[in-house]
Image (spheres, rainbow, N blue to C red):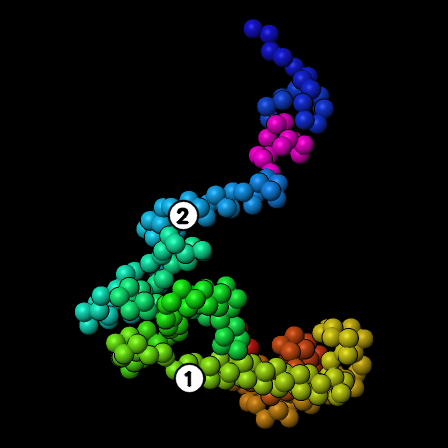
Amino acid sequence: MIRKRNQECPYCGQIMTNIRKHFKICTKKRRGHTHTEEEKKLISEKRKQYLKEHPDEHPWKRGTKFISKPCETLKENLKQAEFNFVEEYSDVRWKHNYSIDIAFLDKKIAVEVNGNQHYKNDGTLTLYYQNRHDYLISEGWQVLEIYYANCYKQEKIEEIKNVIINGKDIDYSEHQLLFFNKVKTLKEKQIEKEEKRKYAEDNGLIKRNGKINGRGVTFDEWNKRKDLILNSGIDLTKYGWVGKVIEKTGLTKRIIENTVQKFEELKKICFYRK
């Protein structure tokens, strides 16, 4: 049998001696089918319709679903208290393919256990979860949004039980305060960081263009950095002094290390692992 050689690639037109090997790396070869926007929309609509007609096939009902430990902890507590509920409940009559973590069908109470990804920085729900919350309410459900950390607190679990029994809503003021304090702390840290950097810039300790290197630094600037390290009040002979100096002065680790290498008197007293 005569082997064919010098075959032309039907995709890029190159003449190749080993055409099969070339097919694997040919940049012109079409790799699968690319759907148009109309095709993507049609596939999405058919997928939604299929899940409505086959709710047991929903991703949230599969065995491969990510198991939420806080949610499972809350379910276990409710089971021990002999509460009757349905897990991962969805209704084919709903407009959207939503699924409820814990559903009390007789009272139409939905309990959702939410992680940090469900909330904005101000403690309110993100757009998707807020839309789900509003839609379930429009369908006559009472929706309890439970922060995941509360699933491990016995007093919060008892509060949830009382709310379910009495049909009341949960007080979210403490939850909102938690996120408010978190954002406040982040803002305070950012302000403190900016103040330290401004101090370093005003005293010529770092360049105003933000570049942190030793090029173009004058001798006076090096001396200012050295004096700032020495007068920081940190014991430079002990382990961990670099981090403390960074916190105290606002200098970066790289600037501190370059300054130490510049002056022999600093090299002698500063602690470094050998």
Q: Which residue is rendered at x = 76% and y = 85% of the image?
A: 204
Please state which of residues 254 and 167 is positioned toward the viewer in this rendering. 167
Query: How many residues crowd mark 1 within 10 Å: few (<14), some (14–19), many (20+)?
Result: few
Q: Which residue is rendered at x = 31% and y = 64% of the image?
A: 103
Label 2 belongs to which residue? Answer: 51
The image shows residue 89, relative to residue 255, as above or below, that is above
Q: Which residue is rendered at x = 64% and y = 78% of the image?
A: 252
Q: Which residue is rendered at x = 40% and y = 64% of the image?
A: 139
SS category of the residue bearing label 1: helix
Instruction: Please state if 156 lies on the left or on the right of 227 as rendered.
Output: left
Label 1 belongs to which residue? Answer: 174
x%, y% of residue 147? 39, 74
x%, y% of residue 218? 80, 81
Majority secondary structure in the magenta region? loop
x%, y% of residue 92? 37, 52
Within the image, what quadrant is residue 187 found in?
bottom right
Instruction: Please state if 143 lies on the left or on the right of 158 as rendered.
Output: right
Decide whether residue 217 is among the magenta residues: no
Residue found farthest to the top: 1
Instruction: For marks 2 and 1, give the CA distance.
Output: 37 Å
x%, y% of residue 270? 59, 83
Quadrant where the N terminus sits is top right
The residue type indicated by label 1 comes to Glu
* Res 17 visible: yes
SS category of the residue bearing label 2: helix
The image shows residue 94, relative to residue 45, as above or below, that is below
The residue type indicated by label 2 comes to Leu
Instruction: Please state if 224 lies on the left or on the right of 246 as rendered.
Output: right
* Res 260 visible: no
Of mark 2 and mark 1, the one earlier in the sequence is: 2
Which segment did they paint magenta?
22-34
